[in-house]
Image (cartoon, rainbow, N blue to C red):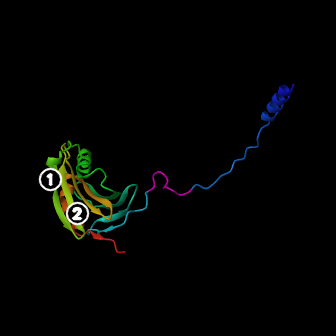
Amino acid sequence: MKILFFLSFFLTASCQRDHIETRQVAKEDSAPPPGEAPAPAHGVHWTTPSGWKQLPGSAMRVATFQLPSGPGKAEVTVIALPGDVGGELANVNRWRGQISLPPMTEKQLAAHRVIVRSKIGPVSTYDFTGGGATKTRLCAGMIQADGMIWFFKLMGTDIAVAAAKPKFRKLLEGLTRDAA
């Protein structure tokens, strides 16, 4: 009889519904919403070449440079990431893939690297031209500064990149540290 009493008590108590409340709580800002740029990286400063227009960063980009119109199209992008992001060879092969070139080996890397001296240290630069009817060309430089690796990439049609390359090189040579 006691068992029947406890069983009926338990079943009766478990059938009662709890009151459910809904509340809205503000979410902590731990990361930017998808599609929005993270806070720009600091540590490196440059002078925008004459005729180029610096646009605000977006997504992973710290900056984008719009080049004056002329024959062909090209743009310059600046990206800063922590660490070495896979190393020099991995980054060079990513760039080569962007213009449909096959990957290169560690042995081939040194033959294609040109060091540009900047005010904050050596910039490893590369210049590649892809195939096809309209040749795509990519000139890129990378430098380590304050625990970040900075990537500067000039990419577009072969003729536009050739015209912009002297100013791109000057931009790299003029890199300095941000004023504290």
- First of labels 1, 2 by sequence position: 1
Residue at numbered disc 1? 110
Say if the magenta span includes residue 34. Answer: yes
Image quadrant where one finds the C terminus: bottom left
Q: Residues within 10 Å of mark 1 (few under 14, many from 20)?
A: few
Picture coordinates of residue 119 (x, y %)? 23, 71
Residue appearing at x 80%, y 32% in the figure: 10
Picture coordinates of residue 101 (x, y %)? 20, 43
SS majority, magenta? loop
Image quadrant where one finds the N terminus: top right
Say if the magenta span includes residue 154. Answer: no
Q: Residue furthest right?
A: 1
Tell which of 3 and 147 is nearer to you: 3
Callout 1 amino acid: Ala
Query: Splitting the image into 4 quarters, where does residue 177 fall?
Result: bottom left
Q: Secondary structure at mark 2?
A: helix
